[in-house]
Amino acid sequence: MEKAALSPRECQVLLEAARGKTAEETGHRLQISKRTVEAHVRHARAKLKARSLTHAVVLAIKKSLIKV
């Protein structure tokens, strides 16, 4: 399985999502806006060709891009 190149921040927001955090909670934790979190999620989804945030998290775990 080929690895998609995700930025460190894209991996961070997917990891927070995997832990059940909302975009708002993730933004607060990473000291970025909710909107910036959502942009990182969109970019990660596009790179992974994921249909949803949940799908992106699953793909990132399967590709060993994040560890929960």
Image (cartoon, grey):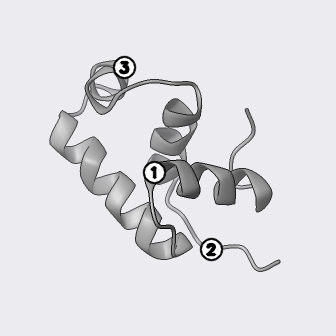
The secondary structure type at the circle numbered 2 is loop
Label 1: which residue? 53
Give the alpha-carbon distance from disc 2 to disc 3, as whole Å. 25 Å
- Circle 2 crowding by C-alpha within 10 Å: few under 14, some 14–19, many from 20: some
The C terminus sits in image quarter? top right
Residue, x 52% and y 44% (percent of image)?
Answer: 14
Instruction: Name above or below for residue 56 compared with residue 50.
Output: above
Please report whichever mark, 1 or 2, sits nearer to the chain's N-terminal start: 2
| 22 relative position to 20: left or right | left
Instruction: Provide the residue designation for mark 3.
Output: 29
Rendered view: 49 above or below 45: below
Q: Quadrant of residue 27?
A: top left
**What amino acid is at disc 3?**
Arg
Q: Around disc 1, counting alpha carbons within 10 Å, would you say few (fewer than 14), some (14 to 19), or many (20 or more)?
A: some
Q: Residue at coordinates 59% horizontally, 49% vertically from top-left?
A: 57
Helix, strand or loop under label 1: helix
Residue 8 in the figure: left or right of residue 65: left
Callout 3: SS = helix
How far across and how far down the image is residue 48, in percent?
55, 71
> Which percent across, then down, holds residue 20?
51, 24
Mark 2 highlights which residue? 4
Mark 3 or mark 1: whose residue is earlier in sequence: 3
